[in-house]
């Protein structure tokens, strides 16, 4: 069975909203996911220079 590609590294939830930072285990790119009411969105998380935030892969990850 294939493992999940994304992992949640930070999460904040309320009654009608969710905010999460997800990491793509294959590329290391971090994404910001926001759900508010019936809408939501996903975007790459950027650093101060406008480049994607990348989490280094751990040696035991595949």
Image: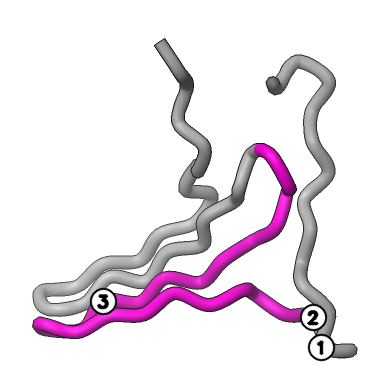
Figure quadrant of residue 29: bottom right
Q: Position of residue 21 (x, y in %)?
A: 51, 62
Residue, disc 3: 35
In which quadrant is the N terminus drawn? Answer: top left
Residue at the bottom extreme of this rendering: 49
Q: Is residue 27 magenta?
A: yes
Q: Residues within 10 Å of mark 1 (few under 14, many from 20)?
A: few
Figure quadrant of residue 19: bottom left
Question: Which numbered tag is attached to residue 9?
Answer: none
Measuring 72% from the left and 80% from the top, which residue is drawn there? 46
Q: Position of residue 13 (x, y in %)?
A: 26, 67
- Tell me whether circle 2 and circle 1 mark residues in contact (CB < 8 Å): yes
Which segment did they paint magenta?
A: 26-46
Q: Position of residue 58 (x, y in %)?
A: 79, 28
Question: Which numbered tag is attached to residue 50?
Answer: 1
Question: Which numbered tag is attached to residue 47?
Answer: 2
């Amino acid at each position: 069975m294939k493992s999940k590609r994304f992992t949640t590294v930070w999460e904040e939830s309320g009654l009608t909203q969710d905010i999460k930072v997800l990491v793509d285990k294959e590329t290391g790119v971090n994404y910001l996911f926001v759900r508010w009411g019936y809408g939501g969105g996903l975007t790459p998380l950027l650093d101060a220079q406008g480049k994607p935030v990348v989490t280094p892969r751990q040696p035991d990850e595949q």
